[in-house]
Amino acid sequence: MFLGFFLSCDYLNKKQGPTSGPIARVGDNFLFGENIAQDMPLGLSFSDSSRLVDKYVDDWVKKQLLIIKANEELSINAINIDRKVEDYRYALIMHEFEKIYIDSHLNTQVTQEEIESYYHERSENFLLKQNIVKCIFAKIPRSAPDISQIRRNIRNFPNTEIEDIKNYCYQFADLSFLDDSVWIDLDELVINTPLATLQNKTQFLEKTVYSETRDDSYIYLFRIVEYKISDQVAPLEYVKEDIENIIINKRKLALKKELHETIYEEALKTKKFEVYRN
């Protein structure tokens, strides 16, 4: 606790100068206060900063011990280690340069026309893996008032006002899904309801428009507006965001290829490299 108090209150808040001695030692390696300070956020409470300092020191000690043990137990080829470190360094440099180039050139705007074109050309790639529905759903306590009225409103939707359903559900429902324009995974919707135990949900969807189930505490009202079953092609609205991400990722790959080719062509013109062949 003294260590945490000293570092967190004095050094890490930079109200006093750094410590004159090390904080910890493992073998010939030492940990100093400035090593911790540069990795610690400012403005923490005493208890938070003390806890983080203690964890930092503990993690550092364990890491150093592991390195020492590894060096003792393993026959490590220094040349191979150096090569791997250098390869990793080059990979980091390349990744960072590619990222900067892509970020500065990437067009993230995807038009509806592009989305529709991609969807229709590759619709077989968007087969559903689950049943989905557009619906009105409400989980209502059995003690709630006017259940007969909300039952009629949901059963007769869309021939009843959605605002009437929303007003009731906002007041009395423990859980509801009231946007009939949005597709939702059926299994996610009915989890923790009696409908979750249905053996054949596909058959249920094909034969059901309105469903009412109950348990000891709740009544579950479920009005199906539209449905799609697994292995059918997903509606465009359901996969629109996925398609946008696919198109953007393809642009990223194209920019990465463009960067490599541009650098190569420029180097070829200026004779920056030579390839010697027998």
Image (cartoon, rainbow, N blue to C red):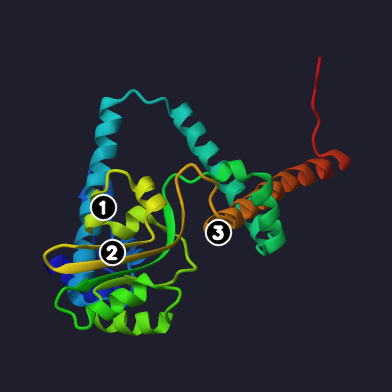
Q: Secondary structure at mark 1?
A: helix
Q: Secondary structure at mark 2?
A: helix
Query: Tag on residue 48?
Result: none
The residue under label 1 is which amino acid type?
A: Ala
User: Could you tell me if the residues under marks 1 and 3 are in contact, i.e. CB atoms within 8 Å?
Assistant: no
Relative to 1, 165 lies left or right: right
Mark 3 = which residue? Answer: 241
User: Could you tell me if the residues under marks 2 and 3 are in contact, i.e. CB atoms within 8 Å?
Assistant: no
| Viewer can see residue 163 | yes
Residue drawn at (58%, 56%), measured in percent from left and top? 236
Q: Is residue 260 above or below residue 216?
A: above
Label 3 Cα crowd, 10 Å radius (few <14 / some 14-19 / many 20+) = few
248 or 50: nearer the eye? 248
212 or 128: nearer the eye? 212
Query: Tag on residue 33?
Result: 2
Relative to 130, 93 lies left or right: right
Label 1 Cα crowd, 10 Å radius (few <14 / some 14-19 / many 20+) = some
Lower position in the chain sequence, tag 2 or tag 3: 2
User: Could you tell me if the residues under marks 2 and 1 are in contact, i.e. CB atoms within 8 Å?
Assistant: no
206 or 123: nearer the eye? 206
Image quadrant for the N terminus?
A: bottom left
Lower position in the chain sequence, tag 1 or tag 3: 1
Q: Position of residue 265 (x, y in %)?
A: 83, 42
